[in-house]
Image (cartoon, rainbow, N blue to C red):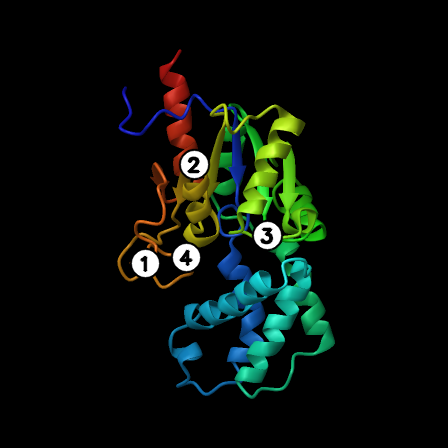
Amino acid sequence: MSSSYPNLTTFNGLSFDCYGTLIDWEFGMHAHLLPLTTQLPASHTYNTNPPHAALRRLNALTSAHERAQPTLPYPEVLTTSLAELAAELSLPPPSPGALSAFGASPGTWVPFADTIAGLQVLKKHYKLIILSNVDNTNIASTTSKQLGGWPDGVAFDAMYTAQDIGNYKPALQNFEYLFSHAKQDLGVDFEGGDLLHVACSLYADHVPAKELGLRSVWISRGAEREGHQGIGGLTDEMRGKTSFEWRFDTIGEFADEVARQFGAQK
């Protein structure tokens, strides 16, 4: 059976954004916003539009710190931003314990329901790489426990973080680091057409991918649908700034298409 999608069988490696693409980033962040938002009046926009209004504001704060302080470790980006949000809302500052827990929380956030099974399929056909804006401690916890800590877990071939690179996506430096290290470490040559990038975030991943000529898959997680209120949707601002060639709602759907195309070659 022929596919209406472009050919996915010519690549040797897949690079993934992790949080938001493989891991349920919004759910994890929301859990640490609740102690703030529950102190606000029921009529506050952060309570009448939960959880996305507060998430968007926290995301704006973290993004600002990533741009202004590209070597600031990700746990400090998170804790500084949460404290700033509390101050904006004239709420008591979060306790040191709450801040510490937030900084270490990405490594505990759970995968989307389709992630593990989808990665198992993809691992049969490609080398798997993570390019993430978090720190080494959190990504190690995610890949060893959340994504690889049980019998059906999946091992990644390489992981490159903002801590390794000294900058945060969407900086082109992060992708250039990916290109050089994927070739050196794994023999996956971007210039030779070996590499395909897979991500949810249009701003952090697909905009720089277009600028660098990196072919990409958008895992939309529903963000293409009218009225989606999450982070990173296909807004008017993003239209024209990206050039992803494939769109799937989930990693599972992407993996199904990969299996279908490789199966058709037999």
**Residue 261 occupies quadrant:** top left
Tell me the amino acid under the disc marked 4: Gly
Pointer 4: what residue? 232
Q: Residues within 10 Å of mark 3 (few under 14, many from 20)?
A: many
User: Distance of mark 4 from mark 1, alpha carbons?
Assistant: 8 Å
Task: Work out whether residue 253 can be spotted.
Answer: yes
Marking on residue 213: 2
Look at the numbered discs 2 and 4 and tell me whether their residues touch, using CB distance below 8 Å.
no
Residue 69 is situated, as x and y percent measured from the top left of the image, at 63, 63
Q: Earlier in the sequence, mark 3 or mark 4?
A: 3
User: Distance of mark 2 from mark 4, alpha carbons?
Assistant: 21 Å
Tell me the amino acid under the disc marked 2: Gly
User: Distance of mark 3 from mark 4, alpha carbons?
Assistant: 15 Å
Q: What residue appears at the point 36 percent right and 46 percent down from the top-left corner?
A: 242
User: Distance of mark 3 from mark 1, alpha carbons?
Assistant: 22 Å
Tell me the amino acid under the disc marked 3: Asn
Residue 103 is situated, as x and y percent measured from the top left of the image, at 67, 64
Q: Is residue 16 above or below residue 258?
A: below
Pointer 3: what residue? 133
Q: Residues within 10 Å of mark 4 (few under 14, many from 20)?
A: some
Q: Residues within 10 Å of mark 1 (few under 14, many from 20)?
A: few
Q: What residue appears at the point 52 percent right and 41 percent down from the top-left corner?
A: 16
User: Distance of mark 3 from mark 2, alpha carbons?
Assistant: 21 Å
Q: Is residue 42 above or below residue 262?
A: below
